[in-house]
Image: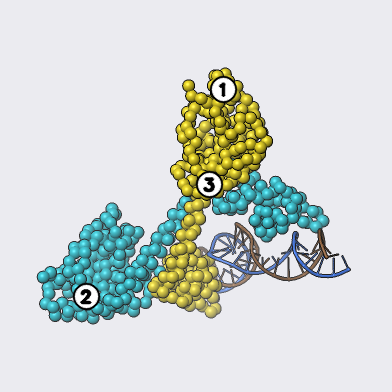
Chain colours: A cyan, B yellow, C brown, D blue
DNA sequence: TATTGACTCTACCCCAACAGGAGGCATCAA
DNA sequence: TTGATGCCTCCTGTTGGGGTAGAGTCAATA
């Protein structure tokens, strides 16, 4: 016979927990002194304790453990229960992995943005490669972009391979304009929405810092530059939303980053 | 302004939870009628609620959410926190996957045993293929097998490819006998213990049902048979522990299954 | 205007699975 | 005999709310 303290050291279950298990009738000590109320545990209790520890390590609740230990004494009788538990655990694993990959997505995007602090507000001429995207075409107000982006993200969010962008097919500003909302993807996928490849080419680009409302000044800057180098522009123009309202916070509009990309004729 | 019920429907947070968040100063309604104490939520509160829902879906506790929303308002400021959370989640995933594979191991073994209900207590002559095992050699009493098996399982348990077995190198019964405790593995691994291949060959086998104490009668049966077919036996003999004390329960000894395998000279 | 039914308020108890601590006996060695 | 542990019961606290009771409020209808 062991006192509760000795038994605790043997089984590596805390004294608190042992008293709790006694109260819950999960592990009743073999003998209880009726005067002092001291608990005394037998060697057989060690075995029971081991079973409890094992089942706990498999994620069973104390209630489940109680019913298992009361009803069964052989592993072959609990295979269904074990299978169920395994399935439940695998469901949990899937959920957690989904969360983890969502977090990964956010972190990737932030990393990408953090790496390009040097090119803010600076006009560049560069060659962009072909870009696979999932997209929807729609007509409406500029401010309704959110809805379209929602659609695209729901369809292909988990395969996203870069920042989302809009294509504009009108060369002047219009209330009701023709827009394609695109999400770059790593490889072709089948979805409800269409895929296509945006062509490679020579682009003049400028990263606009701040709220979308002030993006006009950046357009002015970029068109002035294009005029100065005497090039012709091609449609559609692109707006890449490097950093906008995030997945968690709406964020500070003064920190929004939008890259304007305007294709020019190659010389 | 929305009443708590309306706000609950909009945000899909229960009324109970909203009151709880108010109490915890996590989401304080924009206006509270000082006479009726009715809570009224604004449109801006919807955004805050969304942030809370998002952070909750990432597995943050309410306390964490509170400190995050108080201190930050942009995703780029919380990347470390998100990274930490992701790491924590991945740790959880690893733990759960480990549990899941342990359960898988138990289930596999039980399945294996369940499939062979037909050969109990029945002498068979069969050819066994070569078997890769991890093993320890030791001397002692038969009843000390548990210790040796523990060693082997700790070293290679996760690569186990079948039921554990003992090899006996003495042909008669001895108090202090020479034993090798083996665990079959799927493929060669490097571990503290040695690996080897048990040779293929012709074996007479018998599955003994019940406690190890009565295994003598099964040995008797099998040796009688070998004598009757006039074959010579080879050492070592094998005892395969198809079903013994399990990972969870000690189990019912009457259900233990041990296959005795005795090699015979080929004709 | 009165009433009704739907809503909302606070306050209290409940769950898991113990942990921590207070205050009071029991046990054992010096 | 005297500490020093060890053990006992009882109470509270944790996380994220759920459930219920009894009372007050709101808006629409009769």
Q: Is residue A214 left or right of residue B175?
A: left
What residue sits 47% from the left and 51% below the top?
A90
Verify CB contact (< 8 Å) between mark 1 and mark 3.
no
Q: Nearer the viewer, mark 2 or mark 1?
A: 1
Looking at this view, is D15 or A221 the one in front?
A221
Looking at this view, is B146 or A147 the one in front?
B146
- Tell me residue B142's x, y (percent): 64, 38
- Tell me residue A5's x, y (percent): 71, 58
Q: Nearer the viewer, mark 1 or mark 3?
A: 3
Asked whether residue B243 is in view, the answer is: no
What residue sits 70% from the left and 54% below the top?
A7
Helix, strand or loop at mark 1: helix
Where is mark 3, residue-wise? B193
- Tell me residue A209's x, y (percent): 29, 78
User: Counting other residues with Cα less than 10 Å from the Cα at mark 1, is it few (<14), some (14-19), or many (20 or more)?
Assistant: some
Q: Quadrant of the C terminus of chain A?
A: bottom left
| Separation of marks 2 and 3 at Cα, in angstroms | 63 Å
Where is mark 2, residue-wise? A124
Q: Are marks 2 and 1 on the same chain?
A: no
Residue at mark 3: chain: B
Asked whether residue B48 is in view, the answer is: yes
Residue at mark 1: chain: B
| Separation of marks 2 and 1 at Cα, in angstroms | 89 Å
Helix, strand or loop at mark 2: strand
Of the residues under marks 1 and 3, which one precedes in the sequence?
3
| Separation of marks 1 and 3 at Cα, in angstroms | 34 Å
Looking at this view, is D29 or B166 the one in front?
B166
Q: Are marks 2 and 3 on the same chain?
A: no
Where is mark 1, residue-wise? B226
Residue at mark 2: chain: A
What residue sits 80% from the left and 57% below the top?
A36
């Amino acid at each position: 016979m062991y006192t509760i303290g000795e038994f605790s050291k043997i089984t590596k279950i805390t004294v608190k927990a042992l008293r709790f298990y006694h109260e819950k009738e999960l592990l009743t000590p073999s003998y209880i002194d009726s005067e002092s109320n001291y608990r005394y545990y037998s060697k057989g209790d060690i075995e029971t304790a081991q079973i409890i520890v094992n089942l706990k390590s498999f994620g069973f609740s104390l209630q489940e453990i109680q019913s298992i230990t009361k009803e069964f004494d052989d592993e072959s009788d609990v295979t269904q229960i074990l299978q169920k538990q395994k399935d439940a655990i695998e469901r949990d694993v899937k959920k957690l992995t989904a969360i983890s990959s969502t977090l990964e997505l956010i972190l990737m995007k932030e990393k990408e943005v953090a790496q390009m602090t040097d090119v803010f507000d600076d006009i560049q001429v560069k060659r962009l490669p072909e870009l696979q995207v999932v997209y929807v075409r729609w007509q409406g107000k500029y401010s309704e972009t959110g809805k379209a982006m929602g659609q695209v993200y729901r369809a292909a969010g988990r395969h996203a391979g870069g920042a989302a962008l809009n294509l504009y097919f009108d060369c002047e500003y219009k209330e009701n304009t023709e827009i394609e909302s695109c999400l770059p993807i790593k490889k072709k996928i089948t979805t409800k929405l269409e895929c296509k490849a945006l062509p490679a080419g020579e682009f003049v680009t400028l990263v606009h810092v701040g709220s979308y409302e002030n993006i006009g000044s950046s357009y002015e800057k970029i068109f002035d530059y294009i005029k100065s180098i005497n090039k012709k522009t091609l449609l559609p123009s692109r707006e890449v939303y490097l950093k906008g309202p995030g997945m968690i916070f709406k964020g500070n509009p003064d920190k929004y980053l939008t890259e304007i990309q305007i294709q020019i004729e190659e010389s």
